[in-house]
Image: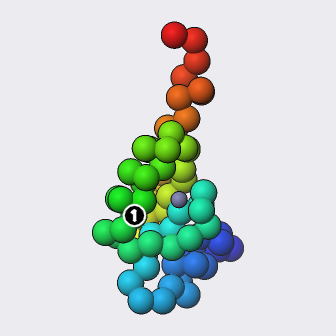
Amino acid sequence: MLTEAQKSILRRKSDEDCFCHTCNAGFNHLGIARHRAMHRDNKENCKITFSKGDTYEYKYDTKNHSSK
Ligand SMILES: [Zn+2]
């Protein structure tokens, strides 16, 4: 059974081969790095599936790192 991300990659148009679950949007492998940096700059968590199908969650929400 395919996840939405995998389905999105399979039916991708142009050269979109990565997927941001946070935005529900596809990106190409060059754009995804900048897109991830955008989330980091906004201190937003994001979850990204890369072209090989591997998924990573990035925790940029500093509120989760608690009590300093
Ligand atoms: Zn995103």
Outermost front residue: 42
Query: Would you place residue 18 above or below residue 15 in this image?
Result: above
- Furthest toward the left, the residue is 30
Label 1 crowd (10 A; few <14 / some 14-19 / many >=20): many
The picture places residue 56, in percent across and down from the top left corner, at: 48, 51
Residue at screen point 58% across, 18% down = 66
Residue at 54% across, 44% down: 44
Decide: is 34 above or below 25. above
Q: Nearer the viewer, residue 28 or 9?
A: 28
Residue 55 seen in the current view: yes
Of residues 61 and 2, the one nearer the viewer is 61
Judge from the rendering whether residue 33 lies leftward or rightward of residue 11; answer left or right: left
**Residue ID for mark 1:** 32
Residue most toward the right?
1
For residue 60, above or below residue 12: above
* Percent position of residue 68, x then y: 51, 10
Left or right side of 21 for 32: left
Look at label 1 and name its amino acid. Answer: Ile
**Quick one: SS at disc 1?**
helix
Q: Quadrant of the N terminus?
A: bottom right
